[in-house]
Amino acid sequence: MKIESDFLPEKQCIVIDIGTKYTKFGFATEHSPRCIIPTCCEIDGTSIPDIYKCKDEQTLMLALTNFIHMLFYKYALVAPKDKKVIIVESLLSPTIFKEILAKVLFITYEVTSLCFVPSHCASLFTLGISTGLVLDVGYKEVILIPVCEGVPILRLWQAMPLAGQAVENQIKTRIDIGQLSDESIDSIAEDIKARCCFVTTLKRSKILATGQSVEPKTSDVEYHINGERSITISGDIRETVHDVLFEENIDEMSITTMILETIINSNVDIRLKLAENIVLIGGTVMAKGFMSRLKEELVEKLKCSKYNNLKITKFKFHVAPAYENYIAWLGGSIFGSTNNLNIVSQTRENYINENYVPDWPTTFTRQKTE
Amino acid sequence: MASYMFQKTITSICTCGLQKLLPDLFFCRHCITLRCDFCVSHEIDTTYCPHCFENLSSTEAKHKKNRCASCLECPRCFNTLSTRSYSRTPEPKKPPQKMYYLLCLFCNWRSHEPNIPDQPTSSGNWPVNKNPDDGRILDLINYYKSVTLKEVFDKQKRNTKHYGRNYMHFLEKFGLNAMMARKKVGFPNFHTDGTGFSTSEINPAEAIENVPELSANTFEDILDLKQISTLEQRFATPELQAENTDDLFPIRKHLRVKHSLRCRVCEHNVVKPEYNAVKFKIKHLAYYYVPEIKIIKCEPLLAGKWSSLVLKLCNPSQASTAVRFEKLDLNAINIIREPRQLEGEDLISTPKQLPEPIPIVLELQGDIIVPEGEIKIAARDDTAEYDDTNEVNTDNDDPKYVYWRKGNKVALKFEVKPNENIKKNENVQLGFVMHFMYSDTMLHVINPKQPQTVLVPIKIVLNLPNSF
């Protein structure tokens, strides 16, 4: 029988990426997550669809306890006691969430050590590069943080609520799904987004925005709801729902201008490097045609006077050796396979003594785990 | 019937502060208090396949990535696939050969759809699919491993002082070589001077300018939704995430676990399942110890008026018990309850930090008069049913509170008065504390004494419907 290194019990390290919509979960050194499950749980029979929306500390703690319980006993099938845990999290995730998560893992589940890895930096591990412009288009918001030589440049962060949820809201307003409960409307909108819609080209989008029809016309789709009714999703809607991501708001901000603003505000020396190392992560970028549309938009926007003096002619994109929705997780998994994990993670003893989770940039309370 | 069990009319407040139904609670016999799912620590007892019920050891399960080796799931509807066979004669003169394929009896999916070749054995070595970029990820992992090792090495090099001489001959003289060798196990293989240590090379990913465009027929092609997988189907195999339903491959059945539960405070087992059977070695459920309360009669509730309520108490244990009632004091509800101990029990220190109890938020919408004094309840006797005489001593009972009595059951009269401002069709929430006599029947090795009895307080919350 083949004996692998992860066969030894002390080597096992658990990597969790809790997203707003889906949670990626698996073991370090493995090449793909064991499961991608919706981030939701139940408290006493009432379901909590979005853990991040729990404002009250008590509810959040109960929700996270139940959620972690489900992860470990339903999917990982290991007891969390004396295990190492890596949490891949966005740098912008709320502190309270982080604190409660640490409390639940250390006190209720007694893990040995815990390490928070910023998702934007971790994503670069999957490419073997150290500088890049990382754009995370998730469910609730799009977050852009450039990373230079492995260090995120927090000064240049950009975030906007233009992501999967915005697209789903477009679907809900433009397609009459009918009288159903909120949850089923949400899941139908998500299903339509994933299975029927794509991101059209810039040229077609411009023509369609003026109300004219375009050749070749996109075919309509018959969509069945619960096997009872069927609705027709017109071709125009199929190709234009994602346009909301590229529409500028009153501050002239969209995904496109976010990238350009970051580049224009960055140091002259890394501008070119950022433009030629764009990394797209998150589930929404998996929509068909997203990458080519983004490139078209960027090139188009360069022509406008504001960005004219950027001296950038081309944009280059990275393609990771995995699906975009679990790139950050994979980065965490690669990180977990290295020795560095023992150096930078916080131990349980340390947490109990200090009663405090170090904020990401500080490491001084951390002691080496053996 | 199941809905009757889940009705939250009568709930008990667990030691941790959560409101639970009696069947959901456990009773720790060492702390003599209630525990629930939330305040016990879960351990993994055995891993098994939910379809073929084969038990796997934890190492085996880990090796198989928590998947059953023999059971497969339909990638389309997630039901268990069955293996079908047919005979074929490859050459006219040879005996017919049996071939096997997979079929979902629910949605009629066949293993022919993703072009899995039929197998000559029934167990079938059904192919396992891998991410085509596995090699690249492995390279990356090895690269980063070596980078961190180099970092560690550089740090060590900085810290160690360099002596001008070589002490190797001392090592051999004092037999230190073997010790050093043992010490070195597990350490990376560095050369002592650091030369020759190199990180494995990796080509950083190249960014591309010519990103994949939408194919020309994306627009006009008629979309067949039956051919496009749902997100649930894609996420079932995160490394493949096939968009076309024809590319979905059968999934190995995910294993499940039997939990054994342990009290966090005293670290004694509360529930322990038996290996390879649907039985328990230890099951300290509250249902077996705490008298069960049921409502048998309730007069219509009127705002500001007293009405009577009859509750039936049933003693499930083999020892007789006694109950005493008390009003629920909302001010003292959140006082932390220290775990109590029986006499002669070892004092168990609690060195580790326990999760904080959950503050109880409760609002009572009325007043309640509880029976006074101690009320005895007989032990459960399975033969009592066949006894015709069925004599019950009711002499000591106060007829003001005891409605009737039979075997191990007793019906008690309560008086309830909802608040003046109670709204119609809104449940009336009331609470009281029930102290019940728990007699300890455990054998104490250290101190074999007479069975001890302890009064255990349990907070009960009634949620009376008010829809008249």
Image (tube, coloured by chain):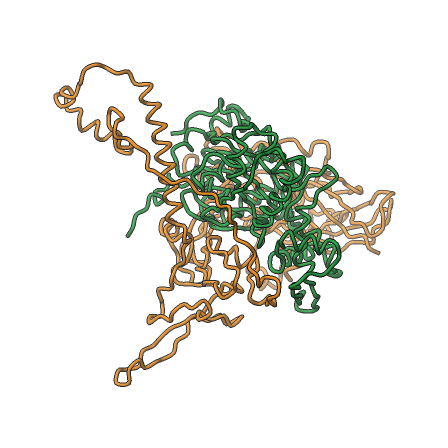
> x and y percent of residue A306 in the render?
67, 35
Visual hue assigned to chain B: orange
- Viewer-proximal residue among A6 and B201: B201
Single out the residue that lies furthest toward the top.
Answer: B164
- Viewer-proximal residue among B26 and A155: A155
> x and y percent of residue B36 in the render?
57, 44
The residue sitting at 53% across, 70% down in the picture is: B106
The residue sitting at 78% across, 47% down in the picture is: B428
- Viewer-proximal residue among B131 and B337: B131
* In the rendered image, the vertical position of residue A337 relative to residue A3, given as above or below: above
Left or right of B374? Residue B366 is right
> x and y percent of residue B368 in the render?
78, 43
- Quadrant of the frame with the N terminus of chain B: bottom right
> x and y percent of residue B146 in the render?
34, 35
- Quadrant of the frame with the C terminus of chain B: bottom right
* In the rendered image, the vertical position of residue B81 relative to residue B335, given as above or below: below
Visual hue assigned to chain A: green
Task: Evaluate whether residue B28 shows in this view.
Answer: no
Left or right of B418? Residue A175 is left
